[in-house]
Image (tube, helix red, strand yellow):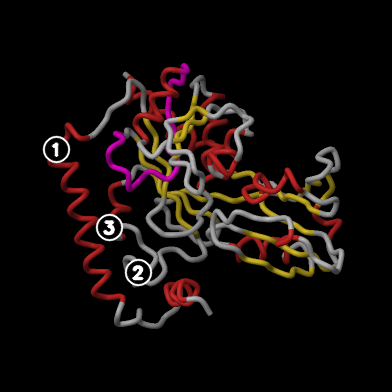
Amino acid sequence: MALGASLQRRWYSDGRPPAWTLPLEALYRAIVKRRAHAFRSQPSRVVRLGVPVVVVGNITLGGTGKTPLIVALAHALRARGFVPGIVSRGYGGSERGPWLLTGNDDPVRVGDEPSLIRQSGFPVAIGRERPEAAQLLVDAGCTVVLADDGLQHHRLGRDVEICVIDGERRLGNGHLLPAGPLREPASRLGTVDFIVVNGGTRSADETGMTLQGGMAVNMADPSRVVPLADFAGRPAHAVAGIGNPTRFFDSLAAQGIGVHGHPFADHHAFTRDELTFSDGCPVLMTDKDAVKCSAFARDNWWRVPVTAVLPESFYDAVAARIRKAAS
């Protein structure tokens, strides 16, 4: 087993972290603390835009469902009179930016998550320097900027912070990297405005989120849309290059599908040969992976879109915070 996979398994077990990770954790903790203090003590380093900024992120390494939440939040805010745009680092892409996506950009260049979000119809800007990329959205007429995965990027000033947690795995063993999955101490949760929990269990002060799907879209012929239940009772290859592939595999198995899981690293750049299996069974993948594979898709490849579902009261509360920040 690769070192990375072995470590991640330890993060979510009851065992102690490997001894060699503890000094590195202490060093990482000091760096995180020093960086946060630098921005608090020098407000001039923080770039404020002319519109409210909502950061959606997490404090753990790996997927928690941020991208579906970003899209759902953008739809909800547009319905409430805002003009939302999304800024992202463009992780996994080669473009350093700042760059305003056109809708025809190569995911290899701009990143898989920005490409997927852009398909939802909202303006998306990417860049290693997020304030400069976000300014492109303001210049394009956006009245609120949603920052994808930006809790740890203090240079971009923000008015609302939303932290997303995987309800199944929560915070793992509670240790910081590399001893555990935390990018920031658990105490960081006490400073954010909203905590959204994707599945699993949640406390009274957290907002529950579910990912709902149920349909599959053929990647070679998008006009072919079938219920996911059509694949029940037979084997299928499930491909996932996301932060938590097991969540995707389990969701398919819950539909009665005989899942042959193929996990890849997050943001993996797929090739056609990697997804070509000799048995002819259908290949199911997430939207995030499909956006990188559509150009060379085969007839038996299907993407499985999901939608984040949250209480309307959550969207109302976020909108109220935004209006207060804009006043």
Q: Which one is earlier in the sequence, the residue at label 1 or at label 3?
A: 1
**Residue 128 horizontal/vertical position (percent):** 38, 40
Relative to the observer, which residue lies in front, 181 or 172?
181
Q: Quadrant of the C terminus?
A: top left
Q: Quadrant of residue 18?
A: bottom left
Q: Amino acid at mark 2?
A: Pro
The circle on residue 178 is 2
Q: CA distance from mark 3 to mark 2?
A: 18 Å
- Left or right, 69 with reference to 173: right
Q: Which residue is mark 3?
A: 187
Q: Earlier in the sequence, mark 3 or mark 2?
A: 2
Residue visible at 26% across and 70% down in the picture: 24
What's the residue at 66%, 44% (across, down)?
Answer: 291
| Horizontal and vertical percent position of residue 150 | 38, 43
* Residue 49 position (above or below residue 267): above
Say which residue label 1 marks: 42
Q: Amino acid at mark 3?
A: Ser
For the record, the magenta segment spans 140-157
Q: Is residue 144 magenta?
A: yes
35 or 66: which is nearer to us? 35
